[in-house]
Image (cartoon, rainbow, N blue to C red):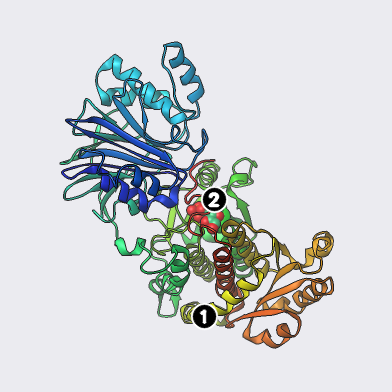
Amino acid sequence: MCGIIGFAGREQAAPILLDGLERMEYRGYDSAGIAVRSATKGLQVKKTKGRLQVLRDLTHDGAELEGTLGIGHTRWATHGEPNDINAHPHVSENGRIALVHNGIIENYLEIKEQLQRHGVTFTSDTDSEVVAQLLEFHYNECHNMLEAVGRVLRRIQGSYAFGIICSDYPNALIAARKDSPLILGFGENGNFIASDVTAIIKHTRDVVYMDDGEIAVVTAENIDVFDSEMNPLEKKHSQVDWDVSAAEKGGYAHFMFKEIMEQPEAIRKTVSPRVREGRVVLDDLRLPAEYVRDISRIFIIACGSSYHVGMVSKYNWERLLRRPVEVCLASEFRYSDPLVDEKSLVVVISQSGETLDTMAAMREAKRLGARTLAIVNVVGSSIAREADDVLYTWAGPEIAVATTKAYSTQLVLMDLVGLYLADLLGTVEKSEYDAILWELQTLPEKLEQVLTHVEDIQYFASRYFNHNSIFFIGRNLDYAMGLEGSLKLKEISYIHSEAYASGELKHGTISLIEPGTLVVALGTYAALFDKSMSNVVEVKARGAEVLAVTTERFREKMEKTADSTVVVPDTHPILQPSLGVVPLQLFAYYVALQRGCDIDKPRNLAKSVTVE
Ligand code: F6R
């Protein structure tokens, strides 16, 4: 949520900043800005409402701003509407200090009022401007930028990643973080700060992940990192193991479509290294066997699509582990006085590894004594580093705001972990274990088959894109999968949509079914197929138009009732959502395309939600 980049180097900064912001635009796209400093022109700031292209046009692709030191920001508004003034960078009253900020300053109003009493005038509605003005206030007192930053950090409450430049310091930018990601990058022609590796991967793979409370001084030659007491720190460098092409569209019209098509390969990368000689091998998992045997309860905590993975996993893990599994929305969990203790295993699922709600829930679980296992995609992210154990999904960078390949890899990784734990507990028959593991390995080929039929789904989307309310129904795993199908559709096509457990329809929702209502009926879960069919017949009897997703095994039965049917290959029942969800992703994609929506950057959304 919001993207930050900063550069101190031996090349013109503005084009580098603009390129980095473009790669990070998925983190927020309601306004953008850059500030660059040069010896002759001093601090130059350009910022504007709208997409990055507007900023590009305004600055003639950066040519308007001169200097080799600069910061940039792409915004997802929290405090203050998206407009030119509220866009970052924010500049202090005397024009000497420019700052970009991710996160939320909780006590900004109090500080603002105090500064106003000292005669400071504010131009924006943001919490971030308050920090720029407070910095100037302290800088005027101590005449030392680093000292001023230290004083500000001690005064503010909330979450932040900052990039700061000051016209008195021609060669250095200052960065600081707390609860909002910030990475330092070491390049040949200069050094970087960024909220996201994607922004700087073109220039370097040599990075350092900043930790909470740290401050960095970045120059063209060097990066020095300090703790909150200004003691110098030696930080461990990491090498990013993917390159720039992974974060580019590569000929596809949209990142979302590219990422849907990448799913077979992504699943292969998640599964293959973790299967050896017919067994699940999780080298990175350090859960002691005695601990696993003692687990009384499992909590799966996540948000959005990651939560939907949790819903699928609840069914699968309870079946495999014979232990109670509770799935919790992270934003609810932390305030619900949860019944977590030392015998609880808490699994948090997050693509970005930065979702604030999930992070806070994980901290609460740790405080209550639980052991935490994180299922994360972004390597080195905050959740990954704070969890007791982390398993990476290795899906590669996911740029589209609507998740697809991250969801799919989370699903299979949860299946692998479930199988691993069930084996440790002795709660799974060998034949069942072997069958699931075998099918997990064949999923990529089966997915490839599903993806050879994209035109069928494109056709169905062209038939149904004009509906303004769509229901997804299914039982058990199909219900969990429907939740994801419905979310995908509403977030990118803006069609109202709900997912219901089929059996629940008759308890109220069926009153909404009228002639012509589109119902997407999911009938892939073999054990309850006949029951699901009865519900399909019920909605048909009330005039619904039914688009069904089923498996080869049930094709004939489904085709007799549904108006349109999408068929996916059969696999082990617990893995069926991994195949069934793909037509739903494609359906959402093509419907959004037909409706002319901005697929990769849906309105009001941004990837990586780092506010509460
Ligand atoms: C939907 C989507 C969101 C995320 C949610 C959690 O397509 O992407 O619902 O799943 O914001 O994000 P992570 O997984 O990064 O914690």
| Residue 287 disc label | none
For label 1, the crowd category at 10 Å Cα-Cα, with few meaning under 14, some 14 to 19 and many 20 or more, is some
Please say if the residues under marks 2 and 1 sit with CB atoms less than 8 Å apart.
no
Q: Position of residue 258 (x, y in %)?
A: 43, 68
Identify which residue, 137 or 353, lies in the foreground: 137
| Residue at 18%, 34% in the rendered image | 171
Mark 2 or mark 1, whichever is nearer to me: 2
Q: What is the spatial separation of the Cα atoms under label 2 and label 1, in whole angstroms?
A: 38 Å
For label 2, the crowd category at 10 Å Cα-Cα, with few meaning under 14, some 14 to 19 and many 20 or more, is some
Dot 2 corresponds to which residue? 603
**Disc 2 residue type (three-letter):** Arg
Q: Is residue 184 visible?
A: no
Q: Position of residue 593 (x, y in %)?
A: 54, 65
Mark 2 residue element: loop
Mark 1 residue element: helix
Q: Is residue 411 left or right of residue 147?
A: right
Q: Quadrant of the C terminus?
A: top right
On the image, which quarter does residue 480 sit in?
A: bottom right
Above or below residue 607? Residue 98 is: above
**Disc 1 residue type (three-letter):** Glu
Identify which residue, 584 or 493, lies in the foreground: 493
